[in-house]
Image (cartoon, helix red, strand yellow):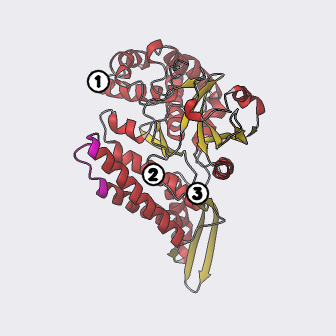
Amino acid sequence: MRFVFSPPADVAAGLLSLPWAQPLEDWTDERIVEIEQRGISRHVVRFVMDSERVYALKEIDERLARREYRLLRDLDTLEIPAVQAVGVVVDRRTADGEDLDAVLVTEFLDFSSSYRALFSHPRGHQPAPLLLDALVELFVRLHLAGFYWGDCSLSNTLFRPDAGTLKAYLVDAETAELHPSLSDGQRTDDVARAFERVGGELLDLQAAGTLPENIDPVATAEDLTRRYSSLWRELTYEEVMRPEEQRYRISERLRRLNELGFDAEEVELITSGDEVRLRLTTRVGEPGHHRWLLYGRVGLLVEENQARTLLNDIASFRGYLEQIQGRPVGEAEAASRWLAEEYHPVIAGIPAHLRGRLAPAEIFFEILEHRWYMSEAAGRDIGTKAASKAYFSDILPEVPPDLTSGAIPSVTPP
């Protein structure tokens, strides 16, 4: 048996003592855990907890396991949202000398939901548009990077809440291919496969009675392709303008690009007579301006939309401090006091039995939303403390424990 894993080596060292000489479905190790609302897989998949980390183990042919491991590592380098590849175990044999398939090991994505969980627990809003927006953005990022998925589906994606939206993560790259770039034919084929798979998954939910009656599976799958085409065109089309327009038109185009969560890596202007053609090379990396700005100020690493909300709250808190103290307050002082006086007390106040229902930053975002609604009703600012108390009492308990998987799962008996 050989375990090839990514650095740092000590992260996965504890996995070496697992019963690799047995078929994965036969394992009874005490570290095996059960994950509620998990997705559907063609292969045997088990989950293991070691040193407070949860890992997903997938039993698969060695050639496919090595290939998927490399592709997931490539996506990490490209900063495209995907599960983290930890390692691959090969040359497995039973005590009787029978060959066993390899096992791909990935780190489980905390605070993530499957599409089935989101449809089962919609929390008062329609999940379909949020799911489609998140999946399409991930799909486009992959294609911009030259990544042909080959099996884009809701089952092969996990979703994390991000300040009222969702962020999609790729969890299965078994059929994927990485090229320098994709042709229109490759993209069209990939989108057609996604249409079939997403439509089929929604039809399955409909047959099981878990799909809302107002959702048409085929129409929703068609909407996926429309949203993809619209976003792809906005990011890649060649714009024609007059020379005197180019400054503000370029600025406008870049602003739209940023609003969609993308950046321009290269701007190319081609002059032909009285026309100027604008070509943009769109950066495929994960957007992270607000994430890293927040991290630099207060040391919190959260999702992009969550970071934007928290930065806005820091700015608001800074204005509040300047008003009550009658003096200018520096950015660093405001950020430090916000962390100590606003954020940490709220997170520390989460009741023990409700911890893990949502990521801490998502809970803080929802408390800010709840504060706004309560203040509107009261006609005055009720404050974060009162909003937190009401949220912990009335709203957070309604989030099902199995909606997201941030809590440490219960261990199954050996």
Residue carrying label 1: 379
Q: Is residue 208 magenta?
A: yes
Q: Secondary structure at mark 1?
A: loop
Q: Nearer the viewer, residue 143 or 330?
A: 143
344 is higher (above) or lower (below) than 102: above
Residue to which mark 2 is pinned? 153
What amino acid does circle 3 point to? Ala
| Coordinates of residue 214 in the picture (x, y in percent) | 23, 47
Which sits earlier in the primary sequence, circle 1 or circle 3? 3
Residue nearer the viewer, 403 or 175: 175
Residue 176's label in the rendered image is 3
Q: Nearer the viewer, mark 1 or mark 3?
A: 3
Q: Describe the element under mark 2 as helix, strand or loop.
A: loop
**Label 3 CA crowd tier, 10 Å (few <14, some 14–19, many 20+):** some
Calculate the distance from the C-alpha at mark 3 to the C-alpha at mark 2: 13 Å
Give the residue type that dot 1 points to: Gly
* 339 is higher (above) or lower (below) than 26: above
- Residue 92, how many percent across, how many down? 70, 39
**Residue 228 sits in which quadrant?**
bottom left
In this picture, which residue range is highlighted in magenta?
Answer: 207-219
Of 305 and 66, which appears nearest the observer?
66
Residue that protrudes farthest toward the left in the picture:
213
